[in-house]
Amino acid sequence: MLEELPLASPGFSEPLDWWQQTFPQGRQLLQIEDANGDEVSIAYGTIGSGQPLLLLHGIGSWSYNWRFSIPALAQHFRVICLDAKGYGFSQSYHRSEQVGHQVRELGQMIQQVADRPVWIAAESLGALTALALAQTAPELIDRLIVINVPIFPHKLPSFGMQFVASLPLPIVRWVDQQRWIRPFAPIVKAVTRQIRREVVVDPTQTSEVDLYWLTYPYLNLPGSLTQFATDLQLAAREIQRYHQGQPNWISTIQQNLARIHCPTLVLWSDCDRWFPPTDGQRLADQLPNAQFQLIPNCGHVASSGNPTAVNAAILRFADTEILSQIDPG
């Protein structure tokens, strides 16, 4: 059962369970063995029928990011939303993480929720994870849609991320487990609203309900803050190693892009302040079977920034792929 939060503002009523409202069976759980060998519970929801389409979120977020795409895409696919380990409503253990742990964990999730190769639509770190999985386990993936991928990064893209990555993990873990962050819920929501200004073109579209759900895991579910800080520290280290010419996960993915042969749609927001559209074109040029498309009037978080354009692009890509299978000429 969801725990209650203080009202966000006068007259604001707490929303009903988003999972129950969105998916016929509500929030479901599956068990995987993470990269450390620990068994963890992964939260997911599914709706629709036919070809399975996984919707993957980026770092620091969860399945709620895809709220505007699920109904439209479920008319054409069996849509599956997964919360990555430690995010949203998925469980996490507070141990050190291995670089690229998300790839192994995603592979296990796919094997449990789908009976055939899946389509994946993923943004940001979720998209980088999907590219890595397509290189190591191509048999699990039929088609890819990757959005605003941090494939050629210069640094962690925001001051907030850099600050969290600089915090000592024992302190973050203590604050997280003791839930000392809850009394500061108004501040957390104000910071979240400010961050939204960096990742969406029109931040006024972020409602009180959006803030409630975007911050819910951090305020109510111990583990989310620790996982976020841990993954940011891993990312910062790998970016540093990347620019110093040392072995790193990012370079490994770059060097193996030619191994991804499944049809791939590279979507990029025209107003992404974190990673420029030139990165998207550069990525598409290095993939053997890819097409590139800009998402208009959109910031980094495309799934909620311009979902109409994202949904349309995915469905056009689906139609093109279906027609090519019927008539290769």
Image (cartoon, rainbow, N blue to C red):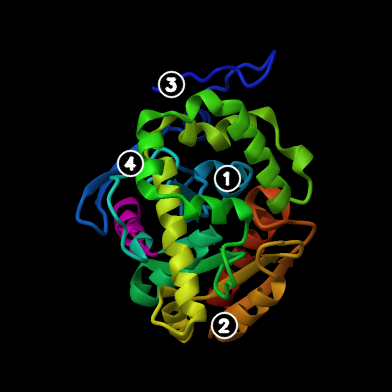
Q: CA distance from mark 2 to mark 3?
A: 53 Å
Q: Secondary structure at mark 2?
A: loop
Residue 258: x and y in percent read 47, 86
Please say if 222 is above or below 15: below
Q: CA distance from mark 4 to mark 2?
A: 44 Å
Q: CA distance from mark 1 to mark 2?
A: 35 Å
The total of numbered circles placed on residues is: 4
Circle nearer the N terminus (2, 3): 3
**Quadrant of the frame with the N terminus:** top left
Circle nearer the N terminus (1, 4): 1
Q: Which residue is mark 2?
A: 328
Asked if one can make out residue 264 in the rendered structure from this viewpoint, the answer is: yes
State the residue in front, 274 or 325. Answer: 274
Q: Which residue is mark 3?
A: 3
Query: Few, some or many C-alpha atoms within 10 Å of disc 3 (few <14, some 14-19, many ≥20)?
Result: few
Circle nearer the N terminus (1, 3): 3
Query: Few, some or many C-alpha atoms within 10 Å of disc 4 (few <14, some 14-19, many ≥20)?
Result: many
Q: Secondary structure at mark 1?
A: helix
Foreground disc of the pair 4, 2:
4
Q: Which residue is mark 1?
A: 65
**Res 91 label:** 4
Q: CA distance from mark 3 to mark 4?
A: 16 Å
Q: Give the amino acid at mark 3.
A: Glu
